[in-house]
Image (cartoon, grey):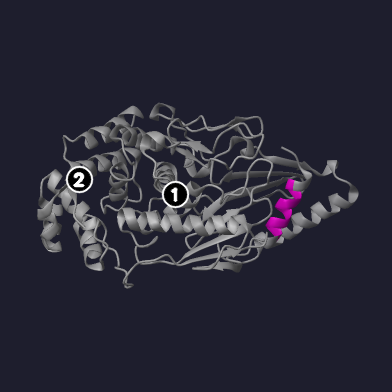
Amino acid sequence: MCNQLKPGRPHSIYCILPPHMLENIAKHGDAKQREIAIDTLSKDHTMRHFRAVQAALAPRRAAPMPTAATPSANRTIYTANHTETLPGTVVRAEGGKPVKDEAVDEAYDGLGATFEFYLEVFHRNSIDDAGLPLIGTVHFGTDYDNAFWNSQQMVFGDGDGELFNRFTIALDVIGHELTHGVTEHTAGLNYMTQAGALNESVSDVFGSLIKQYALKQTADKADWLIGAGLLAKGVKGVALRSMKDPGTAYDDPRLGKDPQPDNMSHYVRTTQDNGGVHINSGIPNKAFCVAALEIGGHAWEKAGRIWYETLTDSHLKPTATFKTFAKLTLSTASRLYGASSAESAAVKKGWTEVGVL
Amino acid sequence: MHAELTTDGGFAAIPGLARPVVLDEHDLSPEDSAEFARLVAAARDEASAPGPRAAKPVPDGRTYRINIEGGDALRLQAADPSIPPAFAALMNFVKGHGHR
């Protein structure tokens, strides 16, 4: 498959170049050449080109290559039957038919959508980039108002029905949890203070992008909400977080007010929540949203690529701060699109607007 | 005895859910008060028994703390997904009989 500089104008030179030359261009060409070379490599789904894409995206971490000819999802959904025993009992395995249990089928479909997103957009073969089977457990605990990733699988509660609905109801929540696994296998961001808030933000970014990709939405059409549909009827709010307007997702007598800041001037210092990882993530969330809206189009294509390549960049340390992460996204944008590109300017605008740079 | 249960972490930081649940045994019936004392004793024994150290918090997992005052003070902590059974039983009792 050939890349196109403009619609209807194939870049024939990139169609006939062997992968090693495309890799070389991807590493050493100018910004436009790199973009086209990487894109060309990425659009050929043969394993030869799949490997070439991985090699071209230096300085990404080395990852084991999949052995299967065509990567495909390997999902297993369990039920905990309202206990807290993991993983529980198998209720739907890969290829199995729907079981008429909303939570089971939503988890199955959500894991599939997330797998497809990472494979098709970033050529990542599952969480570990080596085809790791995806495991999810639903009906965890009794009235359990939460979902989490335990380094081996995703776990989803049913909610209590009064404040929260089931946690599988939102695709971005499922994508969020799986992305914790991706982060664990790449940057390994510490789960506390600013590194932890970045860990959370990265999960929100890709959780939202997975939903946008499934809906084929452009950035300006996306709701940029995390957990839309999760709040039960009668709760005053629209979701658990707003990436576009942090601090505005809910304001309810029982839940309180959404505590997320949208700027470093309101950064929350706390010992709760591992140093406010779910609170201060509003700051990098908004930075990404501003950048994506500024770039326009499908957010996963450019803004998402910049964030993904930053996450998988060996220079990103587990102790990263907002500022070091921001600088690395700028460096990535410059490498991919050029230092004076609109994309680099958009990334800079995002971080400047939230007071990080 | 007086118990206070605090919860933090989870998929989202919800201020309303972070408010502690408190329980005073004076508000309990004699039967419930006896059950409360039994659950506290069991959780104390569980916490003092040799075993693996508590695992570090998992992403989006919750951390639970129970403080017991009056009599022998006790401070307990557990986190998703590894909640010891006696801790879980005491936590559920405090949730069921206490108030925010």
Q: Where the N terminus of chain A falls, by quadrant?
A: bottom left
Label 2: which residue? A336
Q: Where the C terminus of chain A falls, by quadrant?
A: top left
Q: What type of secondary structure mainly makes up the magenta span?
A: helix
Determine whether the residue tagged by mark 1 lies in a helix, strand or loop. Answer: loop
Among the 4 quarters of the image, the one containing residue A124: bottom left
Among the 4 quarters of the image, the one containing residue A44: bottom left
Residue A75 location in percent, x, y?
48, 65
Mark toward the viewer: 1 or 2: 2
In the image, A315 versus A353, the foreground residue is A353
Q: Which residues are magenta?
A: B86-95
Residue A350 location in percent, x, y?
32, 32
How crowded pointer 2 is (Cα within 10 Å; few <14, some 14-19, many 20+) is rated as many
Determine whether the residue tagged by mark 2 lies in a helix, strand or loop. Answer: helix
Examine the structure image and report whether residue A201 is included in the region drawn in magenta: no
Among the 4 quarters of the image, the one containing residue A188: bottom left
Question: Label 2: chain?
Answer: A
- Indicate left or right for A92 with A82 as reference: left
Label 1: which residue? A191
Amino acid at circle 2: Leu
- Indicate left or right for A133 with A356 as reference: right
Dot placed on the residue nearer the N-terminal end, 1 or 2: 1
